[in-house]
Structures are given as structure tokens and as C-alpha cells.
Amino acid sequence: MGLHNGDKMMRYEEWSKLARKASKKSLWMVHFCTGCGAVEMPPVMTSRYDAERFGITSMATPRQADVLLITGYLTVKTLRRVIQVYEQMQSPKYVIAFGSCTINGGMYWDSYNTIKHLEKYIPVDLYIAGCMPRPEGIINAFIKLMKLIDEGKARGWEKYQKYYDRYKENQRRVFNFEIKEEQKEEKNEEH
């Protein structure tokens, strides 16, 4: 007694909807603390704001996490590690970026080594405004992400797969820039 096309079968869309409902209720995160946003994370997780009541908890490794938090400015060297962490995460995966640093470099905007526009290198599902966002803002961002997941609109991981070559080209450009800067420094040291 097998299932046939005419029988009531769970279609892909129905399965996807069910998976999204379950996924939004247990967001496991790994946070990449590169700046002052890291200071806001302990209050979010402890008793006053208690993010675990929303199903949000920290994971020790990227392979267990659903959400990558970027909590401050990134340099070229840290971008390499962020990309490595992002690529180790299982799909579906989401990225939340904190404050102006991930958008335009923040107070380090004029540094050659600061990454501006994080979304050029990995897809960002949600930005949190503020420098630095308060714990309430972080909780609200997670609630917004849950809503986007439920509606099927948080699909950055699919965008990364679809436009993988474009993301890799942007990454290659910035990493080649880093190599060229190191070569210039070495030449200056020799003279």
C-alpha cells in the first residue's frame, strides 16, 4: 500500500512551510564578536531579557547554528574567518548584522582595511540599526527574523548558492587587495 500521485501527499510547499514554522521557534546562533556589539550580547541572553524564551540560544560551533551574528566592524582578515564560519553553517542559515559598522564601516569608515557593505561578501538577512543596538533592539531583530522565516522571505542562504560566483569574486577582490598592501609594506621595510 504505497502512496500514489492521486493520494494525499505532502507537497514540497507544505513541507517547506512546516519546516519554516519549526525553524523559527528554535534559532541557534553563533556570534562573531568583532566590536562593541559583543557587550550587548550577555544582557540579551541573561535573565533580564532572556532570549531563550523565544527559542534563541548560543551554540559553540557554526555547524550547529542557524544564525550568524556579526556584532561590529570587520577587517579584511576577520572577513576571511566570517566567510569560513558562514560556509560551515548548514542551510537554512541566516545573518544578522549589528549597527553601522557592518553597513559602512562605522567610525572606521575611512580605513583601507575596514569592510564596508558586508552584503557584498555574504548575504545579510537583517541589519540592526544603532551604534550599538540595545538588547531590546536585538530581541526585536530576532522577532523580525522569525517573521521573515515564517513568511519565507529570509532566504539569503539560497541567494549565496545562486550567486556564489559573484560573492566569491567580491571576496577575491578584497583579499587580493590585502595581499597587495602586505607586499607594499614588505617593500617599504626592505628600503
Image (cartoon, rainbow, N blue to C red):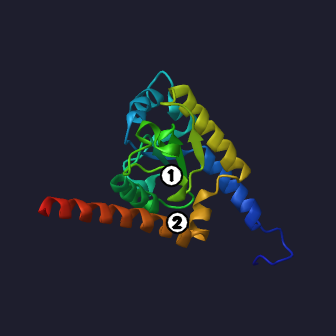
Picture coordinates of residue 63, whole percent (x, y): 42, 58
- Label 1: element kind: helix
Q: Residue 137 location in percent, x, y?
A: 57, 30
Percent of width and height locating residue 51: 51, 32
Mark 2 vs 1, N-terminal side: 1
Residue at x-position 46% and y-position 43%: 105
> On screen, 181 above or below 102?
below
What residue is disc 2 on?
Answer: 167
Residue 53: which quarter of the image? top right
Q: Using the image, determine if residue 27 lies above or below residue 4.
A: above
Residue in the image at 40% along x and 40% along y: 108
| Amino acid type shown at disc 1 | Leu
How far apart are the two marked residues, 2 and 1, measured between alpha carbons? Answer: 11 Å
Q: Are marks 2 and 1 in contact (CB under 8 Å)?
A: no
Q: Quadrant of the N terminus?
A: bottom right
Q: Find disc 1 in the rendering and name its residue.
A: 118
